[in-house]
Image (cartoon, rainbow, N blue to C red):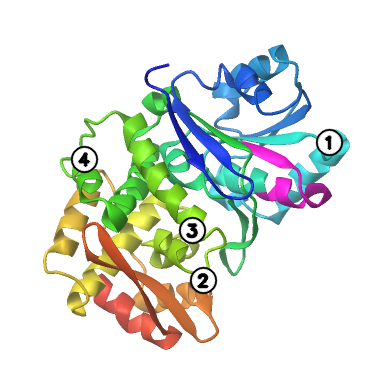
Amino acid sequence: MSDCKIIQVNTSPAYAVTIAPGLLAGCGPRLRELMSPCHMAVVADSTVAPLYLETVQTSLEEAGFTVSTCVFPAGEANKNFTTLAKILEFLAERRLTRTDCVAALGGGVTGDMAGFAAAVYLRGVRYVQLPTTLLSAVDSSVGGKTAVDLAAGKNLAGAFLQPAAVLCDTDCLSSLPRDVFADGAAEAIKTGVLCDESLFSLFEDGTLTAEPGAVIARCVAYKAGVVERDEKEQGERRLLNLGHTVGHAIEKCSGYAIPHGHAVAAGLAVIARAAEALGWTEESVSKRICACLAQNGLPTAADFSPEALAEAASADKKRSGGDITLVVPRRIGLCELKKMPVSELLPVIRAGLEG
Ligand code: GLY
C-alpha cells in the first residue's frame, strides 16, 4: 500500500503505528500478524460505535478473534471511575484472560479509558489503539498514557501502558465534524510549535492542503522519539504538555463542556501571550500562534478569571511539591520547560489572558 506509513515506537514493549486508509476494515488480518486469535473486547463510545463497530467486529471475527463489544456514553464528562468500573466489570463478565486483548476504538476519551482498563484489569492485559479522530491519531493513541478524570482535575488517575499496536485509518478523518477535526488540528499545531515550523505553517492558512496521513505521520514520528527517550515523563516528555496546564484548567472550569483540543488551543494562546509579555519569547510569536489557531476554528481566549484558572491549574499533574513546570514557546519550532513556584501561576495566567 503506497499511502501506508509505519512508524516504530521503541518503548517497552515496542510497537508500530500504522497510518493508512482502510485499516478498520482490515484490522483483523493486521492484528493476526501480531497475536494469536484471542478474545478481543472492543471498547467504543456511543458516537463512534454506530459508525465503525460493525466493520471492526466483522474484520476481527473473520480473522478468527472472538469479539465482545462494550459501548459507553460519549463525552469527556464520562471519563471517570463510574465508566471505568463498568468497562472492568464488562471485561470480567466476558471472562477475558491475560492472553486476551482490549481494543480502543475511537477518540482520546476512549483510548485513555480503555487503555486504563487494560492497565488494571488482571493487573494488565494487552490493548490496541484504533484511533478514529485526528486528535487521537496525532497524539493520544501514541505513547501509552491512560487515565480517567477525578473531581479534582483532568487525568489525575491513570497508568502508563504502551499499546501493542496503533492502527490509524485515515478514512475516518474525512467524515469528522469541523469542530472535531479542529480539536486534532490544535494538537498538530502544538507539535509544530514544539519542533517543526514547516508543520506549523501547513495550518497557517486554515485550509489543510497537505494529506492528513502525512501530517499524522510527522506528529507521530516526533512524539515517538520523545516517548522513546522519556517514556514516563521524567523530563523531555513534559514538552508535549505545551498548552495543557491552562488547557486542562479550562476544561475543568467548563465542567468538560469545552473539548480537549479547543481547551489546549486556548491554553497555548494564553501561554504564548504570557511568554511574550514576560520577555521569554521572540516578539510576534504569540500573534502568529493566535492567528493560526483562529484560522483553524480554534479559540484563543477563555471566559474564566485568571484566579479560577490558576486555582484549577494548581491541581495539575505537572506540579511537584510547591513547583510547577510550564512549557514555554521561545519561537515557532522551539520550546523550553520553565519550573516556577505554583504561586507564580496566577501572574503568568493573568499576563496571558490580558496580553
Ligand atoms: N499528550 C501528551 C503525552 O502523551 O505526553
Amino acid type shown at disc 4: Leu
Q: Is mark 2 within 8 Å of ligand 1?
A: no
Q: Is residue 301 visible?
A: no
Numbered badge on residue 229: 3
The correct choice, above or below, for 303 with respect to 321 in the image is above
Name the quadrant of the C terminus. bottom left
Residue contact at pointers 3 and 2, CB within 8 angstroms: no
Q: What distance separates the C-alpha of mark 1 from that of mark 3?
A: 33 Å
Closest to the observer: 285 or 176?
Answer: 285
Q: Which residue is mark 2?
A: 316
Element class at badge 2: loop
The region drawn magenta spans: 116-128
Mark 4 neighbour class, 10 Å CA radius: few under 14, some 14 to 19, many 20 or more: some
Of marks 1 and 2, the one in the foreground: 1
Residue at 37% over, 85% down:
344
Residue at 73% over, 35% down:
101
Judge left or right: residue 60 versus residue 188.
right
Of labels 3 and 2, earlier in sequence is: 3
Q: What distance separates the C-alpha of mark 4 from that of mark 2?
A: 31 Å
Closest to the observer: 42 or 346?
Answer: 42
Element class at badge 1: loop
Of labels 1 and 4, earlier in sequence is: 1
Residue 212 picture location, percent across and down = 33, 31
